[in-house]
Image (cartoon, grey):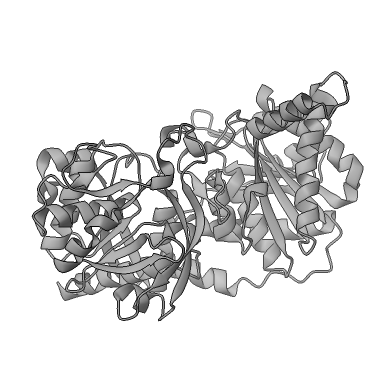
Amino acid sequence: MKYIFVTGGVVSSLGKGLAAASIGALLEHRGLKTLMQKFDPYLNVDPGTMSPYQHGEVYVLDDGAETDLDLGHYERFTSGVMSRLNNLTSGQVFDAVIKKERRGDYLGKTVQFIPHVTDEIKARLHLVTDTNPDVDVLITEIGGTVGDMEGLLFIEALRQFALEVGKDNVCFIHVTLLPFIKAAGEVKTKPTQQSVAKLRELGIQPDIIICRTEADLDEDNRKKIAMFCNVEKKNVVAFRDVAHTIYECPLDLRRDKIDRLVVDKIGLGHTPSPALDDWEHFVRRVIHPKHKVTIAVAGKYIELQDAYKSIYESLIHAGAHHDTKVNIIRVEAEAVEDHGAKAVIGDVDGILVPGGFGDRGIEGKILAAQYARENNIPYFGICLGMQIATIEFARNVCKLRGANSTEFDKNTPFPVICLQEEQRGVADMGATMRLGSCESVLFAGTRASDLYCGADRIHERHRHRYEFNSDFQDKLQECGLVVSSVSAKEGLVEIVELPNHPFFLGAQFHPEFQSKPNHPHPLFAGFVKAALERAQAQ
């Protein structure tokens, strides 16, 4: 296996994850099998207990691992399916080392950062290598910024690892910032020089430098960076701000032939140039669509771009599939509570209520679902959004006054949503929900079955503690709510829908975690199609 390590310098949020994912996409289009990985230096075992304000959305994998949102970019940009082995945190590393020490695995030795902690980091690289023998290239992004204290052990582990597997099998890529100083009218290379100098102090010489820049990279600055950072000029690559969509990133990096630079470094230069026709076709449909729809997303963390990252990307995928621009209106659920759905949401082509936890903004989301149902506006509820639709239907159609979820009202007279039986008594918050891919049965003759092209079984990823209460299933179905899918093992309700509505569907799972640019998730595709039909009918 060959290895690519992507580090970052100067500041955070430079787009290391997008750079790594773009390189993965380009290598796949050269015919190579790639796998992505993220090393996060924070002490949390995983981001599962983090607030979205801290780290954006939690991206859930097939095996139930709660991971960094960059793994979402990895799975969207490449064909690789990630597992818990593909996200390593300092918390996991130290937890493993302490457990080994307590068991006596170190045979009485003094446990130290080097070699014991760095060995644990390298062990993850070896484990991923051994469990994926068909993979040609492993691309690992190291979170944080070079020079941060918390990341030093990861950098040291990579230095050692490169020596062990041979430098001809390793490519180090460093992503830095080229700031434009407006007052001086100049792009400054000094931060990049200092960042690379810090990396070299730690024993790593980057092979390629990716420069994040608002403008293009002129030859003078390219030469200067090459000279002071000890790399060839052709290995200084511009990573420009893209104008329309993140899916332009692989095409932008391709301008400086980064894929050629990488394969030459790791001895895979015999591979053909990437065939990017399908990717370019998708990007064209995103940038120059024929149609337009407006979708309101009513959520709790609406001001945060990364809180619902996968949902926004899935809407883009579905929009491109229908040659349609999806104009997203972000609606604060609490504002709907205060001012009403019509005043806040207005005339839109679709309403989506995403997942979430806690009672803030719940009544606003319920009003949004009611507004969609009563006005024949396409509605798509995801996880909590499905539960919201159930509560609204129980209250306003079934006349179960006070119906609610026990998450928000433990004394509700009609707990149409309740805590899963196996969740009772759970004390730890991390990794204790219903997580990961589960098999579900689809019922023929339903909208959900049609959207999945008549499939009778599906596998979707979950992340929740509360479920549709089966005690109320008969009552809700008598009033017109259709249960169109249940879990294969437990019979838990997975999808609910309304048959006499342009599109009113709620899914207990998270379909956004399986949508890709040229393969939109069928539920998102169906939702956007219904929104487009509404827009064209007006």
Most extreme residue toward the top, as rendered? 110
Instruction: Please identify the quadrant where the N terminus is shown.
Output: bottom right
Q: Nearer the viewer, residue 131 or 258?
A: 131
Q: Nearer the viewer, residue 180 or 177?
A: 177
Q: Could you tell me if residue 514 is visible in this image?
A: yes
Relative side of 155 to 56, left or right: right
Residue positioned 79% across, 51% down in the render? 3
Residue positioned 19% across, 49% down in the render? 366
Residue 515 in the image, given as x and y percentages of width and height: 47, 63
Q: Nearer the viewer, residue 228 or 194?
A: 194
Residue 350 in the image, given as x and y percentages of width and height: 24, 61
Q: Quadrant of residue 101?
A: top right
Q: Is 362 situated above or below 36? A: above
Residue positioned 84% across, 55% down in the render? 266
Q: Could you tell me if residue 229 is visible in this image?
A: no
Instruction: Please identify the quadrant where the C terminus is shown.
Output: bottom left
Residue 330 in the image, given as x and y percentages of width and height: 28, 47
Q: Nearer the viewer, residue 182 or 48?
A: 48
Residue 473 in the image, given as x and y percentages of width and height: 24, 61
Relative side of 148 to 476, left or right: right
Q: Quadrant of residue 213?
A: top right
Relative side of 132 to 522, left or right: right
Residue positioned 51% across, 36% down in the render? 430
Q: State how many labels appear.
A: 0
Q: Is 509 situated above or below 331? A: below
